[in-house]
Amino acid sequence: MYDYPANIITALKDFPRVSLLSQKTPLEKLHNLTNFLSKDENNSTNFFIKRDDLTSLAMGGNKTRPLEFILGEALSKECDQIIITGAVQSNYCRSAAAASAKLGLGCHIQLENRVLDMDSTYHKNGNVLLYKLFGAKISYFPEGENENAADSSLLEISKYYKSIGKKPYIINLSPEHDPIGALGYVDGIKEIIIQCKNQNLKIDGIITASGTASTQAGILTGLALENLKIPVFGICVRRNKYDQKKRIKKVVGKLLKILHSNISIKDEDIHTDDRWLGKGYGIMSPEVLDAINLLAKTDGILTDPTYSGKSIAGLIELTRQNNFEPNSNILYLHTGGHPNIFAYESLLNTSS
Ligand SMILES: Cc1ncc(COP(=O)(O)O)c(C=O)c1O
């Protein structure tokens, strides 16, 4: 069984951090989905779920963990104004706005027009409604696929805040910057290892949505620090599997550097699968709609069209295609994203 993750604890101890998670998120068996999928011929995979959709900040999600380190750094530099960029329905921006409110920091959100041809609900409801409730200022950026340009625009916005006497902290998007946020899932995997140890559970694989690559890179790095060989299947939600793999490799390299670690992660240990990306970021396919409906109806758990709906669709199909060993234990990392369900009302509201 697993040892206490002492290497991770040592590796993270000097990074400034704020506390945004008031408790561990549940790790439990996904009984009904396990039973449902076991009705398929030859399948006997056991599914477990790590409920990071329930992190204790403003409707949860995976971005709470990175923000503990990012905002820790911001406060250690005495910054008082957060500036962040993301898609119109960004869970990252929502979590950053909520955390900023909690810590008494200003928050400026730049919204990129990444998903075209969406209705007015998409532009007003879901996360957009929440940014405003958390008191964030919003500006718009016309492009959705130019990360460097989006980051440069944040720099321009920061000049304005400096001119009014604020001390801004920029949360950049491109992987060229130090991946402080990826420390969140180095720490997240620590929590998972401890829970598995306490439950006497051996995990044979982890499935997660993979977008900025921060989550997958953090998990891979945490596992490597503990010398645990558990495959991590990244379901692409933003770009194709080749580009995503390159990105994860880059983030892992930079992460190991800031951790002063000389371990390495092999290319063949970075698994990315883009079969559920559909027509692109934020665009829902019929398979994803079916998967969202299935998990809601088997286990009463919500997933969303952009992130967790795609990763759960991946889990279901990988299982049906017999990708997992008989009797193996697969952990689904639920990364959240519920609020954007309400932005996709017209596409999700298909059953009577
Ligand atoms: C709900 C949700 N799940 C998964 C992801 C992807 O995680 P990462 O960006 O760390 O790859 C995101 C990213 O925004 C997200 O909001």
Image (tube, helix red, strand yellow):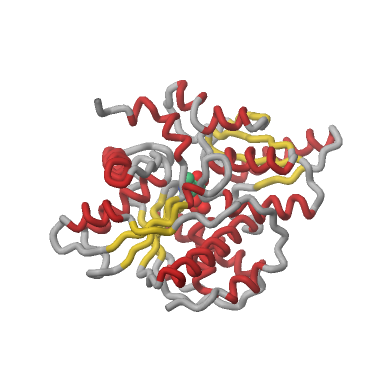
Q: Is residue 92 left or right of residue 280?
A: right
The foreground one among 103 and 231 is 103
Percent x, y of residue 25: 50, 55
Q: Residue at x 43, y 51 (%)?
A: 334
* Callout count: 0
Q: Residue at x 25, y 58 (%)?
A: 319
The foreground one among 22 and 339 is 22
Q: Is residue 238 left or right of residue 162?
A: left
Residue occupying the far left of the picture: 41
Above or below for 263 versus 30: below
Which image quarter is the C terminus in?
A: top left
Q: Residue at x 77, y 42 (%)?
A: 168
The image quarter containing residue 23 is bottom right
Q: Is residue 348 left or right of residue 19?
A: left
Above or below for 345 versus 211: above
Which image quarter is the N terminus in?
A: bottom left
Query: In this rendering, does residue 268 appear at all?
Result: no
Percent x, y of residue 119: 43, 23
Above or below for 140 versus 236: above
The image quarter containing residue 131 is top right
Q: Residue at x 42, y 75 (%)?
A: 229
Query: In this rendering, does residue 100 appear at all?
Result: yes
Percent x, y of residue 277: 36, 46
Percent x, y of residue 137: 68, 30
The foreground one among 31 and 206 is 31
